[in-house]
Image: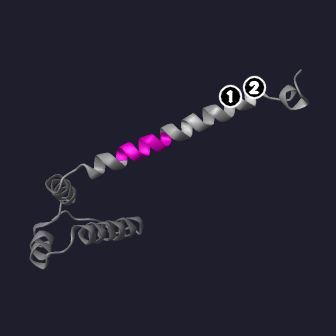
Amino acid sequence: MLGNEYRSFNVEEYYENLRQGIMKAKMRDNIIERYESVLSLDKKELENMLKDVVNELDLSYLAMDKHSHLGTPPAKLVRLVLNQKDREIQMLRQGFMTTNT
């Protein structure tokens, strides 16, 4: 009739492995779907998203004037602003006062 290898078959383990495989496939499909949605954006949409990020930086008029003439790349501009904010936070923690001018 049935051999020993069939008697030791663990149905729960089989279904758990199957469930995990399905979950991995769903996660993979989700990642692929997100990647494809980014790829489907055209250049104009990406430029608009980048402008939105730069606009959210809330740069002073002096900084806007300086960086618009220099043509600072947006990624570098974001890094400069984040570094400046880090310095401001550090100074505040050390007891310096801030002025909004």
Query: Which residue bears the numbered disc 2?
Result: 11
> 13 left or right of 30?
right
Say which residue appears at 90% left-offset and 29% top-offset. Answer: 4
Q: How is the image coloured?
A: one colour
Closest to the observer, 5 or 16: 5
Q: Amino acid at mark 2?
A: Val
Say which residue appears at 41% left-offset and 69% top-offset. Answer: 94
Say which residue appears at 68% left-offset and 28% top-offset. Answer: 15
Q: What secondary structure predominates along the stretch shown in magenta?
A: helix
Q: Position of residue 45 (x, y in %)?
A: 17, 52
Closest to the observer, 74 or 61: 74
Disc number at residue 33?
A: none
| Image quadrant containing the C terminus | bottom left
Residue that protrudes farthest toward the front in the picture: 1
Is residue 69 positioned above or below 48 on the image?
A: below
Distance between mark 2 and mark 1 Cα atoms: 6 Å
Q: Quadrant of residue 3?
A: top right
Q: Amino acid at mark 1?
A: Tyr
Query: Which residue bears the numbered disc 1?
Result: 15
Is residue 31 positioned above or below 98 on the image?
A: above
Q: Which residues are magenta?
A: 27-34
Q: Are marks 2 and 1 in contact (CB under 8 Å)?
A: yes
> 29 left or right of 37?
right
Say which residue appears at 87% left-offset and 23% top-offset. Answer: 2
Is residue 49 positioned above or below 78 on the image?
A: above
Is disc 1 placed on a helix, strand or loop? Answer: helix
Q: Position of residue 89 (x, y in %)?
A: 36, 65
